[in-house]
Image (cartoon, rainbow, N blue to C red):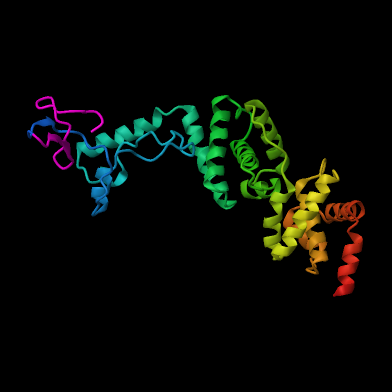
């Protein structure tokens, strides 16, 4: 034992820990040095759900996706209350009512907003980490009074967009607008306002992040995806990506890569998947052909086929 070096009676260091009885015993003289020791280890054996709940030492981890971060408790569940009779049932119904009434305005706002946030995140199939980050951003915005004068839904959408950008999960404003029912210009304004006021630093979107999603939707091969990434790297080295929308340049690179690998897709198909116009695809396509000299490669591939 690290905390007991020797037996106080005979001075022996030959000690034994009996975990079942919670005792430290000297092997030489038999003296019980410590007793009724607390076992802090996990109780692994569980034979039913009731036994598992009794053996738990802690609750669920803290989470910003809950208005009280998971620390609060409800006064009696409905199933438990209806098992009571007479005055006991009425007493717990009154306690539940007062528990709801004494909640603050911020808590009431968070209850509604975080439910909406979960709905939008589920619609967009966002990972748990993005949902948690968005909930944290929204909570900070509420605490600093940034929601006043703005709709709750637009701030939720702005927080989700900021979280997507921070975690490099590509989602466009059009997708957020479709999921939340808020105009994308309003989402953009709220996003810029919230990030500025909270001091959140977000790097520009990388067009490469959009390639796998667009390629999967267009059913393009892995070879075409790799070619599109290669074209984007060349475009970045030639400073073609600066000042241009990441979705437009990514879609154009994928369109060019598909032509080179003879997996032809129309500009309309690519534009619909990327959420941009055909004119944008056409303009970026012409820029890539001119600056990177890809026109010859496309002609060569067409002749070979």
Q: Where residue 9 appears, x then y in whole percent?
A: 9, 25
In the displayed structure, 113 sits above or below 253; it is: above
Task: Indicate yes or no whether the magenta region holds residue 27.
Answer: yes
Q: 95 or 232: nearer the eye?
A: 232
Q: Where residue 41 appears, x then y in whole percent?
A: 27, 40
Q: Quadrant of residue 159?
A: top right
Q: Is residue 152 left or right of residue 206?
A: left
Q: Where residue 24 appears, x then y in whole percent?
A: 15, 34
Q: Is residue 126 left or right of residue 82?
A: right
Quick one: quadrant of the C terminus? bottom right
Q: Residue at x 79, y 45 (%)?
A: 245
Q: Quadrant of residue 56?
A: top left
Q: Residue at x 39, y 27 (%)?
A: 102
In the displayed structure, 13 sits above or below 223; it is: above
Q: Is residue 156 left or right of residue 291?
A: left
Quick one: quadrant of the N terminus? top left
Q: Is residue 125 left or right of residue 41?
A: right
Task: Indicate yes or no whether the magenta region holds residue 110.
Answer: no
Q: Residue at x 12, y 35 (%)?
A: 25
Q: Magenta stretch mostly in which secondary structure?
A: loop
Q: Residue at x 24, y 54 (%)?
A: 48
Q: Magenta stretch?
A: 1-28
């Amino acid at each position: 034992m690290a905390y007991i070096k020797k037996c106080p009676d005979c001075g022996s260091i030959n000690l034994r820990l009996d975990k079942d009885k919670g005792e430290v015993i000297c092997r030489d003289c038999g003296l019980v040095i410590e007793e009724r020791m607390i076992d802090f280890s996990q109780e692994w054996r569980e034979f039913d759900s009731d036994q598992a709940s009794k053996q738990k030492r802690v609750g669920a981890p803290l989470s910003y996706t809950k208005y009280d971060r998971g620390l609060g408790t409800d006064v009696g569940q409905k199933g438990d209350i209806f098992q009571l009779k007479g005055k006991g049932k009425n007493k717990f119904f009154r306690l539940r009512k007062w528990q709801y009434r004494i909640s603050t305005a911020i808590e009431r706002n968070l209850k509604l907003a975080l439910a909406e946030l979960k709905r939008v995140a589920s619609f967009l199939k966002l990972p748990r980490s993005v949902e948690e980050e968005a909930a944290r951003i929204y909570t900070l915005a509420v605490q600093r009074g940034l929601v006043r004068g703005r709709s709750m839904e637009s701030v939720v959408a702005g927080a989700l967009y900021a979280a997507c950008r921070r975690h490099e999960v590509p989602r466009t404003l059009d997708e957020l607008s479709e999921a939340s029912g808020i105009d994308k210009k309003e989402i953009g304004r709220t996003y810029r306002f919230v990030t500025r006021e909270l001091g959140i630093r977000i790097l520009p979107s990388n067009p490469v992040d959009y390639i796998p999603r667009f390629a999967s939707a267009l059913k393009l091969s892995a070879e075409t995806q790799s070619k599109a990434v290669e074209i984007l790297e060349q475009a970045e080295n030639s400073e073609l990506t600066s000042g241009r929308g990441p979705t437009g340049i990514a879609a154009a690179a994928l369109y060019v890569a598909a032509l080179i690998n003879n997996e032809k897709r129309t500009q309309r198909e690519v534009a619909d998947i990327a959420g941009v116009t055909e004119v944008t695809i056409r303009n970026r396509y012409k820029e890539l052909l001119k600056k990177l000299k890809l026109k010859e490669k496309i002609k060569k591939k067409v002749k070979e086929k």
